[in-house]
Image (cartoon, grey):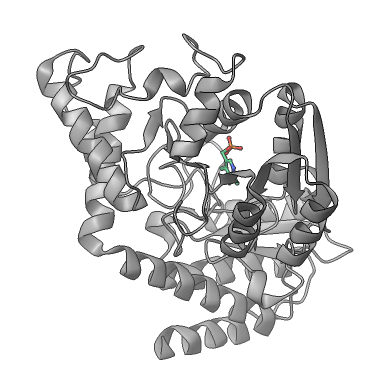
Amino acid sequence: MRYPDDRPAVLTLTSGPVDAYPEVLRALARPVLYDFDPAFMAFYEAVARKAQRVMRTPAPPVILHGEPVLGLEAAAASLIGRGDVVLNLVSGVYGKGFGYWAARHAKRVLELEVPYNEAIDPQAVAEMLRRHPEVAVVSVCHHDTPSGTINPVEEIGRVVRDHGALLIVDAVSSFGGMPADPESARADLYVTGPNKCLGCPPALTLMAVSDRAWAKMKANPDAPRDSILSILDWEEAWRADRPFPFTPSVAEVNGLDAALDRHLAEGPEAVWARHTLTARATRAGIRAMGMRLWPAREEIAAPTTTAVACPEWMDEAAIRAEARARYGVVFSSGRGETLGRLTRIGHMGPTAHPIHALAALAAYGGAVNALGGRADVGAAIAAAMAVIDAG
Ligand SMILES: *Cc1c(COP(=O)(O)O)cnc(C)c1O
């Protein structure tokens, strides 16, 4: 049996965007209210307050109306002044990419870079800051998705706060899927979105902004205003009695509302636990199959993405194409430096249920075998089941 490319996949086990929750899909079909209809303005405030509960912040987060690349680019443009020295922490493609945005606005960007299967060491950050007291802004990616690795943002946040710099955290693919929030990371701009672990389509940014970050952005004459890149324009826009600077994505706000309700009803701890268990089962299966995980150490492997190293002699794109054609299962490739070197199995939102680990392992191992590799699929399923049943 073959699944033709022009038919939708049976299972989308990617590391984002992910399939949306059914509740979210239904909410996307709600009536599209006029944005200045008082009913919509009150609804928007309620959604912002719900997002505040989910993000555990003292004030509602800013909602920007574009997928989180908008938020990251806006963060660089708004917080980084032309006199600022920035320390960008790089453990993967997203961390590296943020440095290019930072360089457009900063006086200078310093980088602390580790191999893309490793994580940033907070001690090394402390050392770098001791040598460079002039650093005003530090940036870090929590889960560098194309590597499937997690950086210790809480420890990094402590080091950065002690130094007195402001911290920008890209938490797009970690927030919602693991214990992570702006306060515990001591983040000044904490950028995430509903299109990964919250199970929405890609369209919005959620950004928590500290008081220090508001002050710095307001004092930055180059921070965008009256612009699609502006954070400042949206400061009070969540309030029902304040106008929107421009039209919000009404349908996507409806979807976000349903995703937040779902997250709160299930309970964040329960959501995190099923992400963790799915990832643990997948990793156990990959090892039992005779394949290698990409992260250098299990402790830094993400609970929301499992990156599997591609065997030297195999064509990574062919493995994904085979998994789709044979089983209708879609995985993510690497990106940039990791492209061709690993395959990513996502555990995000609706796919972060342990049973999906079995489908992922069967499809991945089956594809490897079809291409002449030797993957022990039976051992993989048994190992994953053992983890699931004990969990
Ligand atoms: C998904 C993701 C983003 C959003 O960007 P896209 O590349 O457009 O998907 C930003 N940062 C991280 C770490 C992500 O995983």
Please state, as top left, top right, bottom left or bottom right, where the N terminus lies in the image. bottom right
Identify the residue shown where x is 64% and y is 53%. Answer: 160
Near-viewer residue (375 or 240): 240
User: Relative to 75, does residue 172 appear above or below in the rendering?
Assistant: below
Near-viewer residue (333 or 248): 248
Whole-percent x and y of residue 245? 35, 12
Q: In the drawing, does residue 67 fall left or right of residue 42?
A: right
Q: Residue 333: tell me if it is visible.
A: yes
Whole-percent x and y of residue 225? 49, 12
- Residue 108 sits in which quadrant? top right
Please state, as top left, top right, bottom left or bottom right, where the C terminus lies in the image. bottom left
User: Relative to 287, does residue 25 appear above or below in the rendering?
Assistant: above
Instruction: Kindly give the residue lying farthest to the right in the view shown.
Output: 313
Instruction: Kindly give the residue lying farthest to the left in the view shown.
Output: 39
Near-viewer residue (139 or 177): 139
Q: Residue 142: tell me if it is visible.
A: no
Give the total number of marks visible in the rendering: 0
Identify the residue shown where x is 20% and y is 20%. Answer: 32
Q: In the drawing, does residue 269 fall left or right of residue 345?
A: left
Whole-percent x and y of residue 121? 74, 65
User: Relative to 285, does residue 386 appear above or below in the rendering?
Assistant: below
Whole-percent x and y of residue 327? 54, 58
Identify the residue shown where x is 19% and y is 12%. Answer: 36
Q: Quadrant of ligand 1?
A: top right
Q: In the drawing, does residue 97 fall left or right of residue 156?
A: right
Q: In the drawing, does residue 374 fall left or right of residue 139?
A: right
